Image (cartoon, helix red, strand yellow):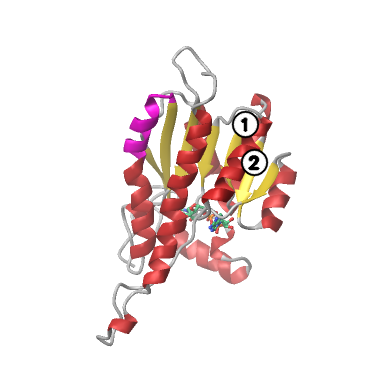
Amino acid sequence: MELVQSSRVERRASAQLRLASWRPKGAKVIVADLNADKGEELAKEIGGQFVAVDVTSTEQIEAAVNAATELGPLRALVNSAGIGWAQRTIGRDGEFGSAHNLDAYKKVIAINLIGTFDCIRLAATAMSRNEPLDAHGERGAIVNMASVAAFDGQIGQASYSSSKGGVVGMTLPVARDLAAVGIRVNTIAPGLIDTPIYGEGEAAEAFKAKLGESVLFPHRLGAPDELASMVVELVTNSYMNAEVIRVDGGIRMPPK
Ligand SMILES: NC(=O)c1ccc[n+]([C@@H]2O[C@H](COP(=O)([O-])OP(=O)(O)OC[C@H]3O[C@@H](n4cnc5c(N)ncnc54)[C@H](O)[C@@H]3O)[C@@H](O)[C@H]2O)c1
């Protein structure tokens, strides 16, 4: 049983996982997202089940975890819900009022960082009740989606980078906490991945091609499948634990 927080990256990712790995292993997927239309569509595509979840609601996360455990033992959680916000820390006019919107900062932290931790603590609690999968006592695996912005935050990315840096920072201590019950925790820091986050149509394609030039090699955005294959590896490779892995074509983001 896999609980997957949906996203456009993960929608494509889970479609690929289904073909490559999950279905042969007999996994069933709960797609948990705010967006019911797209979440339902994905769940249908992969033979999973959609549960409406706002990751700032502990109650709704619990409901999704319970729905997952009704399908079988919960073995994997992929944390991918996330939002961005672009604003400089201070304005140009010297007025307090034009400083970074503090509510926006708190919202990004609430979803990207606290939401991720809340999903981890609740899903891991359910996983801790599982029978071990092997003689070493593995009970489950968790994969978080951070960002290269955790390391190379650009101008205007204070809130987003803070949130993703928090996810990177929690990876080791949470993996240490959960080692006692045989749950592995890893985090991916994607670079520029081709999702609808960049828009659609001709102008978006031109923008993405331009963005891709800044990637070390290959000079393009990453395909969702290339990210998905790392998710599969981290879910299935029992010797991967407490690690943060960049999947970014070698990009190092400049200040702007
Ligand atoms: N696309 C990229 O280049 C890129 C790069 C680095 C990191 N990431 C990270 O990967 C993840 C997926 O990004 P994406 O590109 O697919 O973006 P996306 O906007 O397509 O997906 C984000 C998903 O999160 C959901 N969501 C937002 N707020 C939520 C909430 N409160 N509760 C539940 N769900 C919520 C949205 O409905 C959406 O399905 C995000 O965490 C993002 O920060 C993406």
Marks 2 and 1: CB-CB under 8 Å?
yes
Residue 251, compared with residue 254, is above or below; it is above
Relative placement, left or right, of 225 versus 166 is right
Residue at 41%, 41% (x, y): give it: 187
Quarter of the image for the N terminus: give it: top right
Q: Is residue 223 visible?
A: no
Q: Which mark is residue 30?
A: 2
Residue in view at x 33 percent, y 54 percent: 252
| Magenta: main secondary structure | helix
Q: Amino acid at mark 2?
A: Ile
Question: Height in image: 45 above or below 185?
Answer: below
Q: Is residue 62 visible?
A: yes
- Residue 174 in magenta stretch: yes
| Figure quadrant of residue 99 | bottom left
Residue positioned 62% across, 41% down in the render: 14
Q: Is the shortest distance between ligand 1 and the CB of mark 1 under 8 Å?
A: no
- Foreground residue, 223 or 78? 78
Residue at which label 1 appears: 1
**Residue 204 percent across, percent down from the top left:** 57, 67
Q: Amino acid at mark 1?
A: Met
Q: Which residues are magenta?
A: 171-182
At label 1, counting other C-alpha atoms closer than 10 Å, the crowd grade (few under 14, some 14-19, many 20 or more) is many
